[in-house]
Image (cartoon, helix red, strand yellow):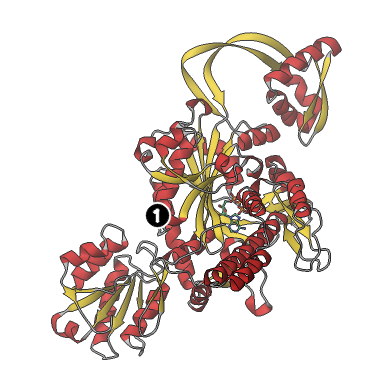
Amino acid sequence: MAPAMTTLKGEPLDKGALEGLLRRRMFFTPSFEIYGGVSGLYDYGPPGTALQSNILDVWRKHFVLEENMLEVDCTVLTPEIVFKTSGHVDRFADWMCTDPKSGEILRADHFVEDVLEARLKADKEARGQATKTEDKAVDAKRAKKAAALKQQAVKLEDAVVQEYEEVLAKIDNYDNVGLGELIEKYDLRCKSGERPTAPVAFNLMFQTSIGPSSNLPGYLRPETAQGQFLNFAKLLDFNQGAMPFASASIGKSYRNEISPRGGLLRVREFLMAEIEHFVDPESNKKHSRFHEVENIELELLPRDVQLAGKSTTIRKTVGDAVKEKIIDNETLGYFLARIHLFLIKIGVDPTKLRFRQHMANEMAHYASDCYDAELLTSSGWIECVGCADRSAYDLTVHTKATQTPLVVRQQLSEPKIVESWELEVNKKLFGPKFKKDAKAVEAAVLATSQEQREAFAKDMETAGKITLDVPVVGSVELGKELVTFEFKKITQHVREYTPNVIEPSFGIGRILSALCEHTYWVREGDEARGVLSFPPVVAPTSVLVAPLSNNKDFTPIVDRVSRKLRVAGISTRVDASSASIGKRYARNDELGTALGITVDFQTVTDGTITLRDRDTTRQVRAEEDKIVAAISEIVRGFKRWEDVEKELPSFTSQEQ
Ligand SMILES: Nc1ncnc2c1ncn2[C@@H]1O[C@H](COP(=O)(O)OP(=O)(O)OP(=O)(O)O)[C@@H](O)[C@H]1O
């Protein structure tokens, strides 16, 4: 089981208090609430929206700008043929079962997980109680009673506890049959007391139809990736044919989750930021910048550890993990390290971050290896970034389906002699014979593989014709007069290959939600108050500007300071309300505002203002321009509060 969740200061997390804060301060809120809401749909309020856009800003700088990625923005609406080809129509599904009595729909793996975890929890509590009674037993009679209680209270045998823990460690590896067997073996019951129905596949995509005639079926995309793959040839051209390169995209995705839960953790509409890094498979997936990250240490939970029923991570440098093949290749290792650095930069607690390798059955249908960046939350360890090696799967299937070569043509420095089945098409006869389908038929002939050509050459010799399946057109017969096959030795000046793809895929809502838990703590005082210690680079608002009172002399100064901050591109919020300065600070601590400026009577006389740090509540005092410059450095991540404190005189006030 996942360890108990703590706050930034190591206290047990009061989830209810944090949720109350996030709701009260409108970080996010259920959509359509006044109509009763729809589960799995959330709106973001002002601080949530600002936090999200700051996380995205860091993401763009950390990945897109740093690596010259080609950012695209593709459509959400996607024709069915795309997802049929990519395999999503047939396989993008979760296992679902039903409570036969109440009709409640359950996600089968979550159901098994929940029941086993609840049993383990009850067992743990019972054991704890029995031990306490035992400790207190001073005479023989009471000791006997305590022993009897222990017998009664402990419901699970040690071996069963171990079995449950082993099942939970590899829960993602079970398919419908496996989950069904677990339900039967452990007699798992729904809330109604009944056993659920056998798990069946439920496709997670939202179906729709495009256009008024309803004859073009489509789906809302469940990931942004396909748009990037379909544009591969154009992107390669844009990149002047240079490999490797990466595309990136930020956009909404949609999944009809069986049972949304955990607030933003499992929703039906969510923002993804995805990278598709295209790499030559013959390069051993080496990465030219690997040396920059090879000494970074990661907490890894490899597949074999989980299969052994364990969940203890191993700490390794990325360099060693790649050498030892715990991480398959440099490019995958490079991105895991870059993901680690990004998450730390935005404020994720490094002690609540691990990288878990997928088990064979858990991997999406397109992936050949996958590591998830998981963050510890009050709902346990949650996947927030998936980093999959999608091999050449997507580009290959789309090439086949469309006869559009999504490949790289690499000029060889030395020509290569290869033996190959070549074909010749008689274009003059194609037009009259196939009319409007001529182009499609020709493309299908040209797209045939070496194996197909060899078989067709034999068919042509024996039967004098071949039969070819042409997408959309159907089955077509071609005689010798239309196409001929010949085995030739040819000199190749160009190597043609389908790139492999490494895909880091970020769920922004999950990251944001986990970040709120990781940065939350409670400041004790006359009244305990929540604080969200976001790093200044992502804090929803960088600076609070607060006049000490509503004295009219303060107004022009407040206006001038906030204008200067705005001109410097620093997000600012003026709070000239009548609440005490302490209350205004506390409100902004809950909002995660990084810094606070106060304009007071001294400002009117000597032009100095104070600057307060949210986390320490310590203050410095200096001239307006010096303070604005210091804020600018902190917000851009160039200086820390401690550096500013060394440079500017400190200031003490009663209400910090
Ligand atoms: N329903 C969802 N709500 C919020 N974020 C999601 C959801 N599904 C996926 N994500 C985010 O998108 C990222 C990439 O999606 P991916 O397909 O790898 O997820 P997944 O393996 O299907 O997730 P899970 O197993 O938790 O359903 C995830 O790491 C997660 O952050």
Q: Is residue 238 left or right of residue 489?
A: left
Seen in the picture, residue 67 relative to 162 is either above or below; the reply is above
* Quarter of the image where the N terminus is located: bottom right
Q: Residue furthest left?
A: 606
Q: Residue furthest right?
A: 463
Q: Is residue 468 visible?
A: yes
Q: As rendered, which of 627 and 237 lies closer to the eye?
A: 627
- Residue for point 55% across, 33% down: 500
Seen in the picture, residue 334 relative to 189 is either above or below; the reply is above
Q: Residue furthest front?
A: 140
- What percent of the width, then of the height, locates residue 158? 63, 54
Q: As rendered, which of 268 and 384 lies closer to the eye?
A: 384
Per the image, label 1 sits on a secondary structure element best described as: helix
- Residue for point 30% across, 75% down: 596
- What percent of the width, then of the height, locates residue 244? 46, 33
Residue type indicated by callout 1: Ile
Q: Is residue 289 visible?
A: no
Q: As rendered, which of 427 and 468 lies closer to the eye?
A: 468
- Residue for point 53% across, 25% down: 409
> Image quarter for residue 122?
bottom right
Q: Is residue 554 left or right of residue 348?
A: left
- What percent of the width, then of the height, locates residue 203? 73, 52
Seen in the picture, residue 432 relative to 199 is either above or below; the reply is above
